[in-house]
Amino acid sequence: MRPTFLGFETQKRTLMLSQKNIDIVGNNLSNVHTPGYTRQRVDMYAAALSTNRDLRWNSKSSKLAMAGQGVSAYGVSQIRDIYIDKRYRENVAIEAETSKTVNILSEVEDVLDNFELSDGLQAFTQKFFNALQDYSGERPDSADVATICVNTATSLCRLLNDYSLRLKEVETTYVGELEDTLSYINELTEQMNVLNDKIVKEKFHYPDEYDPNELLDEMNLYIDELATYGNIDVHRELNGAYTVKMGGVTIVDGLEMKTNRILMEDYENYGEAIMFFESGETYNVESGILKSYYDMINGNGVYATGHQNGAYGIRYFQTAVDEFARTIANTFNKANYGDIDESRMMFAPSIDGAVITAENIRVADSWVKDPTMIGQVRMEDDMTGLYYYGWDEQIDENTGEVNLQNSNVLYLISQFDNPSIKFGNCHDFEGSIYEYISFISNRLGQTIDYEDSRNESAQVTVNGLLDARDDVSAVQLDEEGINMMTYQKWYNASSRMITTLDDLLDKLINGTGRVGL
């Protein structure tokens, strides 16, 4: 025979757990639109038969008498898949990185989008070519036509100056964004550290395998956001706190309850985006928004030095425009003997002695003062052996008339189609001036297309992982509705069971021993 009130105790726990399940279902439904909320459930188990000698009778049937003690619960848990979380955070870093890269390159494209259009570099180069060609059909001493050449060359220089200025503005904008982003990340890790402290304090009041779920939801939101900035690794400590590494270095320490800020060297002094941790380690970026900033600010292609890298970023296209300015200046200066005689230079830097760049290129003073200077050729005096510059005269054999030839201007014109011009110290490109313009324009377009393709692929992967995570962790209205009805029926059945037990107990107390009743 079992203890008299065993059934009541069993059904009391059943009512409590069925009601608690209804409470959790209600909590899930209440948070269906709460950002970061993870679906919860009551972890139940069949109550085991007690083997404590003090709690059972000294008989062989004691185990049978104590059987059927109903249901109990360990606690309320979250339904999450750690593997999906890890994959999502790895891929969302790539998505965020490529998205930011496309945005930055699109701004570079806004500056250089007219490279091959009617108001861009190719058009202004063509105007310079056309002016020289018009001049070549006139006498080399035709000052009016020669002045047009100077004016078109000046317009070309000003366009290059404008490119340099606008690219510098883009660079400054994103350097500022990077500094703001690092400040935000450091604030985010501080918030995570504070939350870690709350989790540890609350965890003390929970069974070993259970947690303050709502605090964990908040922490996971922070971790998901942090994952967009860089490659992270998350580890849960025994005390319940989270330790997070970024780039292989701990930035949130769940054991020591401290953070490790990411800092940046002064950009004005170094001219490069150099990130490092407060603890002294260099930040090795692998993915995320920080990698995009790092690549786009420091990316200098084949010209990379120091902390720069081989990505085609803002710095590379700045260098490409500088190389165009430098190469076209050197090419025409050399063609006009400017490499051996400064008075023959067609282009010069705005600061004496500086290396020519897109920022400082201008038409040389000697050419401005004498536009016909490029119509003269270098000749040697037969008597003295000294060189001088003058008109290329050709005498007509029939009439004896002296005609001035524009041979030097024709030679200058030939440089536009010179197929062996080397652009850049690393010989980034070898070909004609027009081909280099197309090369830079195509490289920018191809880089954007490549990053855009990576972004689309990452988006598909991230969306798939989000769907998979939602299938596991998000509140499903249909499923919760079914659970609600299930637990309601369970509660009703348990209530009916108590009524039945009450009837049995009434019979036992009031009817036992009364014959005939």
Image (cartoon, rainbow, N blue to C red):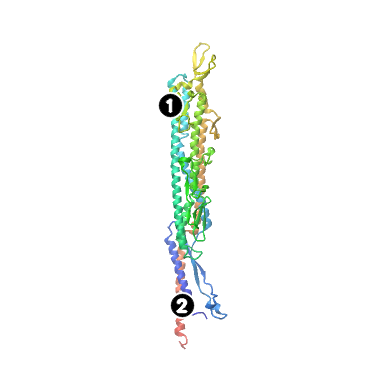
Q: Amino acid at mark 1?
A: Asn
Q: Nearer the viewer, residue 499 or 93?
A: 93
Q: Amino acid at mark 2?
A: Thr
Q: Residue at x 45, y 70 (%)?
A: 16
As drawn, 338 above or below 120: above
Q: Nearer the viewer, residue 142 or 477?
A: 142
Question: How many numbered marks, from 0 up?
Answer: 2
Q: Quadrant of residue 160?
A: top left
Q: Quadrant of residue 481?
A: bottom left
Q: x and y percent of residue 401 in the render? A: 49, 12
1 vs 2, front mark: 1
- Looking at the rendering, in which quadrant would you find the C terminus? bottom left
As drawn, 85 above or below 209: above
Kind of element beneath mark 2: helix
- What is the C-alpha distance between the residues marked 1 and 2? 106 Å
Q: Is residue 52 visible?
A: yes
The residue under label 2 is 500
Q: Is residue 212 visible?
A: no
As drawn, 141 above or below 426: above
The residue under label 1 is 151
The crowd level at tag 1 (other Cα within 10 Å; few <14, some 14-19, many 20+) is some
The crowd level at tag 2 (other Cα within 10 Å; few <14, some 14-19, many 20+) is few
